[in-house]
Image (cartoon, grey):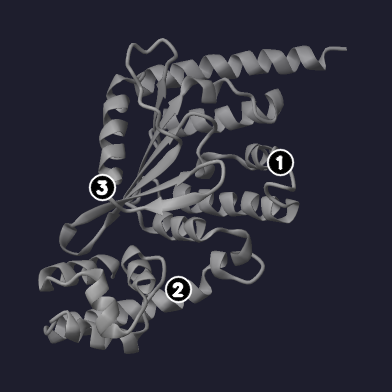
Amino acid sequence: MRLALRDARDAAGFTQADVAEEMEWSLSKVIRIESGEVSIAPNDLRPLLAFLQVKDRAKINELVELTKVARKRSRSQWHQGAGVREHLTDAMRRLVEYEAEATEIRYYSVYYIPGPLQVPAYASTNLANFDDSDIPRTTRDLRAEARQRRRQVVLSRLGDGLSVYALLDQSVLLRPIGGPQVFHEQLSDLHRLARDGKLQLRMLPFDSNYTVTNNATFDLLTLAGQGGEQSEVLYRETGLVDEVVEDSSVQRHRERFDKIWEIAATVEETVEYLSGRIKELEAAIRNANKP
């Protein structure tokens, strides 16, 4: 829907400001509709399509039906429900919806395992490291639960319309968040997914002879549009905010990801490295349990 509206506006030669003025909306509303952050009511869609010079009756009916479905789904989805919505940022809620529709997801992380790949104990420990002044406890608990819901969606779609590529700095596989037992569980799960071919996983070694630009951790999602067209959106977090990005910087992030992916350790080498780390953790657990 968002791609169809944006394409129709471009084809008609209008700017987002033109649409806002004609429809008597705020510019922010137009931006949020085209980014997929909010849905559009059917009663608003018809005059908008008329302004955008979309005259094909079948096309109009198709878009109206899509709008009805989108609004119904938005009201019924778990992340929009009372008691959950207020603990997730706008960007997080959009990310949840994009993850359910993406055809490809690329994770780049230099600090921790990407959210949907985190096992419950790792996710809880990771979020527990924040104090109440940063993220209240109730919010931390609900976000840990949200990560598991996201995990279920992403893993259930692997090989069934979704491909995932995870590029992790070597430090991520060395940082034992939660202690040896929790980290062993996390790496074992990651190892299984990569070994079985469900996840394309590569590690960027410390000794890699390549100048790596200072990219923060991000998720890059590829979405399929009408007619086989694709678009990409970027989700990233900083120490203060998180955001979904849909501008020219998304393409630059994709290009950098692809370059680093090519010089990183292969999937086979990464799986072998994980095997070694798992054995090291098993030894640490045995030593800790000795009387």
Nearest the eye: 23 or 110: 23
Q: In x, y percent, where is residue 67?
A: 34, 78
Nearest the eye: 158 or 113: 113
Residue 156 visible in the displayed image: no
The CA span between labels 3 and 2 is 30 Å
Residues packed near mark 1 inside 10 Å, few (<14), some (14 to 19) or many (20 plus)? some
Residue 282 vertical position relative to residue 23 in the rendered view, above or below: above
Q: Residue 128: which numbered mark, if any?
A: 1
Residue 240 visible in the displayed image: yes
Q: Is residue 221 left or right of residue 225?
A: right
Q: Which residue is disc 3 drawn over?
A: 248
Q: Residue 73: which numbered mark, if any?
A: 2
SS for callout 2? helix
The CA span between labels 3 and 1 is 35 Å
Residue 91 vertical position relative to residue 125 in the rendered view, above or below: below
Residue type, label 2: Arg
CB atoms of marks 3 and 1 within 8 Å: no
SS for callout 3? helix
Residue at point 30%, 55% (across, down): 223
